[in-house]
Amino acid sequence: MNGNGKTIVIVGAGTGGIVLANELRKRIAAQHRIIVIERTETHAFAASFLWLMVGQRERNAISRPVRRLLRSGVELIIGEGSEIDSSQRRVRAGNETITYDSLVLAGGAEMRFDLNGAETFFTLEGADRLYAVLREFRGGKVAVVVTATPYKCPGAPAEGAMLIRDFLRKKGVSAQVDLYTPEPQPMPVAGPQLGEAVSGMLTERGVGYHPNHALRGMDGGVLAFEGRDPVTAKLVVSIPRHAPPAIVRMAGVANEGGWASVNPRTLATKDPSIFAIGDCTAIPLPGTWKPNTPLMLPKAGVFAHAQALALAGRIAADINGGVAPEFCGEGFCMLEAGEHLAGFAYGDFYATPSPRLELRNVGRTWHLSKVMFEKWWLAGPGLRRSALATAMQAGARLYGIDLSL
Ligand SMILES: Cc1cc2nc3c(=O)[nH]c(=O)nc-3n(C[C@H](O)[C@H](O)[C@H](O)COP(=O)(O)OP(=O)(O)OC[C@H]3O[C@@H](n4cnc5c(N)ncnc54)[C@H](O)[C@@H]3O)c2cc1C
């Protein structure tokens, strides 16, 4: 217990956990403790894995010690968050037990690498390794395969395929790059218009797009799809199967799939002292993408970030008084297309009868915005106060992006 102060514990220092801890530290007095439990000492910025994979970034340049990304006054425990006792409001953090007033699950999604022999750009190590493989690649077919849904960042498979194609083309290697997915179109949540636009981007860049390909397995370089001819590839790049983090079940707030069930606007679970944000949640949206299958809010950093800001406001309002903000389901996506170009889509995902998205043309501006966001994120709260950060914020505002934290 913490005297008159409250104790807010956050499990997971990824996108959502970092933003939540920093925003809360700004909003509530120092007598209230903010404790972050994270199992890894180093944070890597996932959106940059795509650039790492094609040699446009170095591994160290996109990683930072977690401590450096947190404001002073936020306590960090490096260890495993486990053994939640919700009746006593206790959670185990490494070797100690902490009593909380509010617990926030921000544990992301775990990845399962079921395809032996496949490469991936979905982890730091995987993207680094894939760069070495692509450098040595002498030609043939490259299959980028979505092994299962849901997965994080709905644009990432298409981005990965386009960047690989661009890299091999510039290297002068003769390669056919194809993208296989069980989904009926790219980013089904974004509706048919955006799906067509993304398929168009893929086709223009010479990437073959194969929807409705549900993977059954892989043997050697041969991919087996349900009801389809087998596909042989020289190089298979997988978007791995995603699984919910164990902490969600431990907290007793999981749906039947193991993801956290939350109120879509308040991020509250059925336990009034437990909230969940980011990839570990499952938020159904109005509309379906196949019979009896609801659309779901995509797992993406942009939503983890916005949910963290809304929840920080809510917890602060509970402590300080005032109006508690809600997460309103808006988000955007910058889709890397290679050649330092990117597309941009902005969406209201809670709109009825189905999410409403607006598209912008492919251009250099969106790519630059993504680079700027990367620099801003990796600068951490200390450096963000510098003149450079101020200039970057002003630049970002020109593109309609709010970098304030
Ligand atoms: C290649 C790639 C490109 C992407 N590009 C984009 C993009 O352009 N735009 C975008 O919006 N999103 C993008 N994303 C998705 C984005 O990175 C994730 O959606 C986002 O990081 C989710 O944030 P989170 O806080 O929910 O989880 P994470 O950032 O994954 O963080 C979860 C953290 O919890 C920790 N953890 C889990 N369980 C425990 C435990 N029991 N104890 C202690 N620690 C624990 C983990 O170690 C991890 O650090 C991309 C992802 C990939 C892989």
Image (cartoon, rainbow, N blue to C red):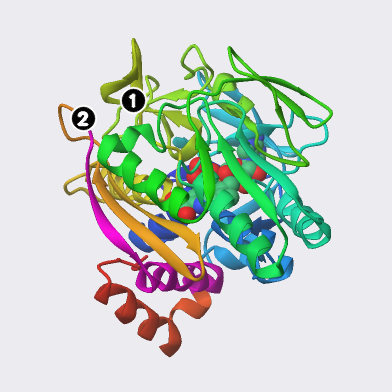
Residue placed most toward the observer, 167 or 387: 167
- Magenta span covers which residues? 355-381
Instruction: Pick the quarter of the image with the C terminus.
Output: bottom left
- SS class, disc 1: strand
Horizontal side, residue 292 vs residue 324: left or right = right
In the rendered image, residue 354, in percent from the top left (x then y), is placed at 21, 30
Residue 329 visible in this rendered orientation of the protein: yes
Horizontal side, residue 289 vs residue 3: left or right = left
Of labels 2 and 1, earlier in sequence is 1
Q: Which residue is mark 2?
A: 354
Residue placed most toward the observer, 195 or 126: 195
Q: Are marks 2 and 1 in contact (CB under 8 Å)?
A: yes
Name which quarter of the figure residue 246 lies in: top right
Residue pictured at 25% horizontal, 76% vertical: 398
Prevailing SS of the magenta stretch: helix
- SS class, disc 2: loop
Q: Which residue is mark 1?
A: 295
